C-alpha cells in the first residue's frame, strides 16, 4: 500500500491533533525554593526549616499538585546559606543561576542572612517569604518580600507587657528589674532596641545587666557572673544559635540560677529545638519561656500528628511550622494566578486574604493577609514554655495548648 504525500500530511496533522491534549495534560514542574543554614551553628534549625517545607510540598503533591496547572507537581530546591551574610548572598545567587524556572521561595532563617538573600531575590523579582524577625527586612521598600512573623519591634513592644501580666497573674507582683544577654545578630538587636530606648523604663522595669556577644560564644562564665551579681527579676536570654543557648543555660545552672530559679525569656524558635532536650535534659529547660513567630496551637493537632509521623520529630517547631505555611502560601498564590509567572504570582500573594484552607492552617485563628510593606497583618505574639520536657504554647490564651507557669524564686 502506498500513501500519497497529501495523505501523509493529513495523518501527521491528525496525529498532532490527537497528541496535543495529551501534551497539554502533562503536568509541568513548579519549583519552590528553601534557603536555610544547613552548615554551621544554625544548621539544625535550618534542617527543621527544610523538613517543614518538604512536608508541605509532599502534601501538595499528594493532594493532586497545582490543579490550576493541570496537576503540576511541586519540586523543592534547597540551598545552604552557611554561617554568614556573605555566604547567604552567594548561595542566593547560585540558587537563581541553577533554578531559572524558580517561582518563589522562603527562608534564610537568621535575619542577617535574610537581609542578604532578599537583596538578590528582590532584584530577580522572586516572591520570598520569611519568618525572620528584623524590621529592616520589610523596611526597605521591597515589593517581593513577605514576613509572616510579627517583627522584632512589634514583639518587643508587646512582649514585656505580656510578660509582666503573666508574672503578675502568677505571683501577684510584676518584675521590677531585667537583665539582657544577647548575641549581635539582627533580630536580637532589633528586639531590644526599644527596651533600651525607654520601653522598659516606661513599664517600670530597670535594666540592671546588659551584655552582647558575637557568636559563637566561647565562654559564658564572665557574662553569667554579671547576671548573678545583678540578680534581675527576669532575664532576656537572646542567643540565636543552639550551642550558645546550651552554654548559657549550663552556666546559669552552675551559678545557682538554673532549673527554674530565674525566669528566662528567649526570643525565637531555637529555644524550642528538640536538640536542646537531648543536650541539656528537661530539668535545665523547665520553665524557660520563648517568644516565637508561631508554635503548635489549638486546631493544628491533626497536622502536627502527620508531621511527627512523617519526620520522626517529637514536635513541630516554629521553623518547620512557618515554612510549611510558606509553601502553602506559595501554592495558593500559584493556584490563583494560574501561572508560574513570578510577577503574577507576586500580585496574587499581595491579594491574599485567607482564613481557611491549607495556608491558613499554619496560622489558626488568624488571617493570612499582607500589608503594603509585606508584613502579615495581625501576626500575634506567641509564647511557648518548656513544661515537663516539652515546649508548649502558653499565649495567646485562646489558642494555647497549656497554661503558663511562672518560675518562683
Image: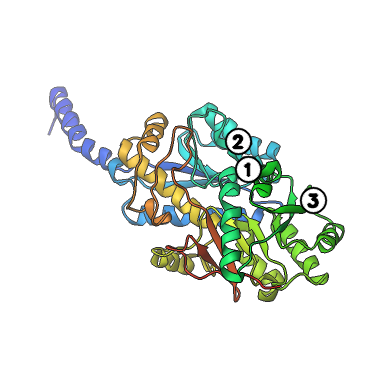
Residue 346 image-quadrant placement: top left
* SS under mark 2: helix
Could you tell me if the residues under marks 2 and 1 are in contact, i.e. CB atoms within 8 Å? yes
| Mark 3, other Cα within 10 Å: few <14 / some 14–19 / many ≥20 | some
| Above or below, comparing residue 200 to residue 286 in the picture | above
Query: Which of marks 1 and 2 precedes in the sequence?
Result: 1
| Above or below, comparing residue 328 to residue 298 in the picture | above
Quadrant of image for the C terminus: bottom right
Residue 221 in view (yes/no) = yes
Could you tell me if the residues under marks 3 and 1 are in contact, i.e. CB atoms within 8 Å? no
As measured in the structure, the alpha-carbon distance from the residue carrying label 3 to the one carrying label 1 is 20 Å
| Mark 2, other Cα within 10 Å: few <14 / some 14–19 / many ≥20 | some
Query: What residue did someone put label 1 on?
Result: 111
Residue most toward the right?
Answer: 222
Residue most toward the top?
Answer: 6
Foreground label between 3 and 1: 3
Query: What residue did someone put label 3 on?
Result: 211
Quadrant of image for the N terminus: top left
Q: Which of 60 and 214 lies nearest the eye of the viewer?
A: 214
Instruction: Please tell me the numbered disc located at residue 136.
Output: 2
Percent x, y for residue 170? Answer: 58, 70
Residue 228 image-quadrant placement: bottom right
Q: Which of 81 and 193 lies nearest the eye of the viewer?
A: 193
Instruction: Please tell me the numbered disc located at residue 162.
Output: none
Query: Which of marks 1 and 3 precedes in the sequence?
Result: 1
Residue drawn 32% across the image and 36% down it: 337
Q: Which of 310 and 301 lies nearest the eye of the viewer?
A: 301
| Mark 1, other Cα within 10 Å: few <14 / some 14–19 / many ≥20 | many
Percent x, y for residue 332? Answer: 35, 44
Residue drawn 39% across the image and 35% down it: 350
Query: Which of marks 2 and 3 precedes in the sequence?
Result: 2
Amino acid at each position: 500500500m502506498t500513501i500519497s504525500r497529501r495523505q501523509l500530511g493529513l495523518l501527521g496533522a491528525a496525529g498532532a491533533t490527537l497528541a496535543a491534549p495529551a501534551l497539554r495534560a502533562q503536568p509541568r514542574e513548579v519549583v519552590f525554593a528553601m534557603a536555610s543554614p544547613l552548615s554551621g551553628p544554625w544548621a539544625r534549625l535550618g534542617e527543621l526549616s527544610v523538613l517543614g517545607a518538604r512536608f508541605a510540598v509532599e502534601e501538595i503533591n499528594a493532594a493532586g499538585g497545582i490543579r490550576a496547572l493541570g496537576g503540576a507537581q511541586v519540586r523543592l530546591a534547597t540551598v545552604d546559606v552557611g554561617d554568614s551574610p556573605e555566604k547567604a548572598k552567594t548561595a542566593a545567587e547560585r540558587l537563581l543561576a541553577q533554578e531559572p524556572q524558580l517561582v518563589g521561595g522562603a527562608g534564610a532563617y537568621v535575619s542577617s542572612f535574610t537581609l542578604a538573600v532578599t537583596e538578590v531575590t528582590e532584584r530577580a523579582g522572586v516572591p520570598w517569604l520569611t519568618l525572620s524577625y528584623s524590621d529592616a527586612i520589610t523596611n526597605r521598600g521591597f515589593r517581593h518580600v513577605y514576613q509572616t512573623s510579627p517583627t522584632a519591634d512589634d514583639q518587643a513592644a508587646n512582649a514585656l507587657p505580656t510578660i509582666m501580666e503573666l508574672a503578675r497573674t502568677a505571683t501577684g507582683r510584676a518584675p521590677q528589674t531585667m537583665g539582657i544577654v544577647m548575641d549581635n545578630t539582627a533580630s536580637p538587636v532589633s528586639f531590644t532596641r526599644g527596651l533600651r530606648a525607654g520601653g522598659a523604663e516606661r513599664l517600670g522595669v530597670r535594666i540592671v545587666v546588659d551584655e552582647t556577644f558575637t557568636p559563637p560564644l566561647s565562654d559564658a562564665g564572665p557574662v553569667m557572673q554579671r547576671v548573678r551579681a545583678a540578680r534581675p527579676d527576669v532575664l532576656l536570654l537572646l542567643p540565636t544559635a543552639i550551642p550558645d543557648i546550651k552554654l548559657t543555660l549550663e552556666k546559669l545552672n552552675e551559678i545557682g540560677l538554673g532549673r527554674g530559679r530565674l525566669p528566662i525569656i528567649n526570643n525565637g524558635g531555637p529555644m524550642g529545638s528538640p536538640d536542646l532536650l537531648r543536650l541539656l535534659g528537661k530539668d535545665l529547660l523547665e520553665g524557660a519561656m520563648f517568644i516565637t513567630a508561631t508554635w503548635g496551637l489549638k486546631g493544628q493537632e491533626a497536622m502536627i500528628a502527620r508531621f511527627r509521623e512523617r519526620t520522626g520529630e517529637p514536635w513541630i517547631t516554629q521553623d518547620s511550622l512557618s515554612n510549611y505555611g510558606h509553601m502553602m502560601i506559595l501554592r495558593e498564590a500559584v493556584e490563583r494566578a494560574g501561572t508560574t509567572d513570578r510577577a503574577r504570582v507576586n500580585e496574587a500573594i499581595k491579594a491574599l486574604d485567607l482564613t481557611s484552607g491549607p495556608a491558613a492552617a499554619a496560622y489558626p485563628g488568624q488571617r493570612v493577609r499582607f500589608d503594603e510593606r509585606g508584613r502579615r497583618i495581625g501576626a500575634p505574639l506567641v509564647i511557648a514554655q518548656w513544661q515537663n520536657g516539652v515546649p508548649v504554647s502558653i499565649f495567646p490564651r485562646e489558642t494555647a495548648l497549656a497554661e503558663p507557669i511562672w518560675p518562683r524564686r
